[in-house]
Image: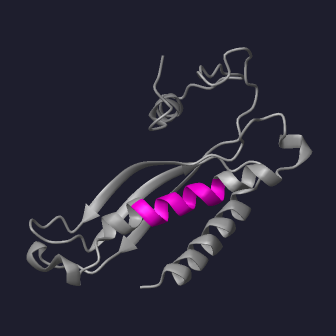
Amino acid sequence: MLEDETTGNGTLLCLKEGLRADAAFIIDGTRLNRAINQHAGNLEFGLVMKGKPASVGVSHVGVNAAEMLARPTSLHLREIVFALNKDRSDLWMQFPSPFQISCRRSERRPATHGSRLGECAVLCDLPPPPFTLATMREFLTESAETFSCDVGP
């Protein structure tokens, strides 16, 4: 058995070794009652929030990028993606919630001790159906631009 859920390295390892197959079984805990003969894929994207670094002693003059990314931005992103489930087409009504998002890794930059964070990044996963990748990218970009204008610097 090869790990493929998190890194994709299982698939890459098989390809590197020259292994080819006409079919594959994907073991997944989300559909216990049936096999899945197709998978829509996953869109991975990153967000970077820029703040204004400041010393802890005068933190009120800074803007903590991690706080801005963690609270208003991530929650807004979750809300707009989940809201897409309300207006999905009849074809997608068989799924309880085809639009999902998961923010799975964050990092702070720079990681200086005693300073408010100047920049923070998060890596997210999003299955694109029933949108195409291009449509989902456009939706996320427009939503981010609108949100950043609403929140302001």
State left or right for residue 127 relative to residue 107.
right
The segment highlighted magenta reads 71-81
Residue 143, position as x, y percentages in the image:
62, 71
Task: Determine whether 52 is above or below 133 in the image.
Answer: below
Task: Determine whether 25 is above or below 51 in the image.
Answer: above
Residue for point 51% across, 58% down: 75
Of all residues, the one furthest to the front in this rendering is 60
State left or right for residue 121 relative to residue 74.
left
Residue 21, position as x, y percentages in the image:
66, 23
Task: Determine whether 123 is above or below 110 in the image.
Answer: above
Task: Determine whether 94 is above or below 22 in the image.
Answer: below
Place residue 66 in its image quadrant. Answer: bottom left
Find out whether residue 73 is within the magenta segment: yes
Q: How many marks?
A: 0
Of all residues, the one furthest to the right in this rendering is 90
Residue for point 49% across, 36% down: 12
Q: Nearer the viewer, residue 120 or 42?
A: 120
Quadrant into which the C terminus falls: bottom left
Q: Please, what is the dominant secondary structure of the magenta stretch? A: helix
Residue for point 50% across, 31% down: 4
Q: Nearer the viewer, residue 23 or 7?
A: 7
Residue for point 12% across, 77% down: 55
Residue 22, position as x, y percentages in the image:
72, 23
Colour pattern: one colour
Residue 69, position as x, y percentages in the image:
40, 64
Find out whether residue 77 is within the magenta segment: yes
Q: Nearer the viewer, residue 10 or 115?
A: 115
